[in-house]
Image (cartoon, rainbow, N blue to C red):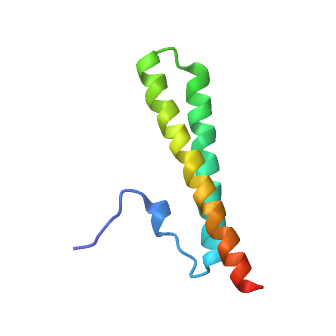
Amino acid sequence: MRFTHPMPAVCQSKADPLADIHEDLAAEQKARATYDNILRVCDDPDVSNVIKFLREREVVHFQRFGEVLDILQSQIK
């Protein structure tokens, strides 16, 4: 039986931590942009509140990945 993950982007490791973190940062930005687009067209407050929460979560993820990138880059120097 083959395991399939519901989110294939999670499994796209390049075995290069810097490349992986850059991909993670890009994925967070893309998700945030998607949520921004949904919020522009959504007029349901209940849906908007959920999307705002998800968008904020992407912002926090982006910040944490950025911190990891800083740590990795400082270890390389």
Q: Residue furthest right?
A: 77
Q: Is residue 70 left or right of residue 9?
A: right
- Above or below, 2 against 31 in this view is below
**Location of residue 49 in the rendering, given as x and y in whole percent from the top left corner:** 46, 25
Q: How many marks?
A: 0
For the view shown, which residue lies furthest in the top direction? 43
Task: Using the rendered view, name the quadrant where residue 63 is placed.
Answer: bottom right
**Residue 76: x and y, percent?**
73, 85
Residue at 66% across, 77% down: 72
- Which of the pair 70/44 is nearer the observer? 70
Image side of residue 75 versus residue 64, left or right: right
Q: Is residue 38 left or right of residue 3?
A: right
Residue at 58% of width from left, 20% of height from top?
41
Q: Residue at x 44, y 30 (%)?
A: 50
Image quarter (top left, top right, bottom left or bottom right) of the C terminus: bottom right
Q: Quadrant of the N terminus?
A: bottom left
Residue 21 drawn above or below residue 40: below
Say if 50 sits above or below 76 in the image. above
In the visual, does 4 lie left or right of 38? left
Q: Nearer the viewer, residue 44 or 59?
A: 59
Residue at horizontal 49%, vertical 24%? 48
- Asked if 69 appears above or below 63 in the picture, the reply is below
Q: Position of residue 58 (x, y in %)?
A: 55, 46
Image coordinates for residue 21, horizontal then vertical, percent: 62, 68
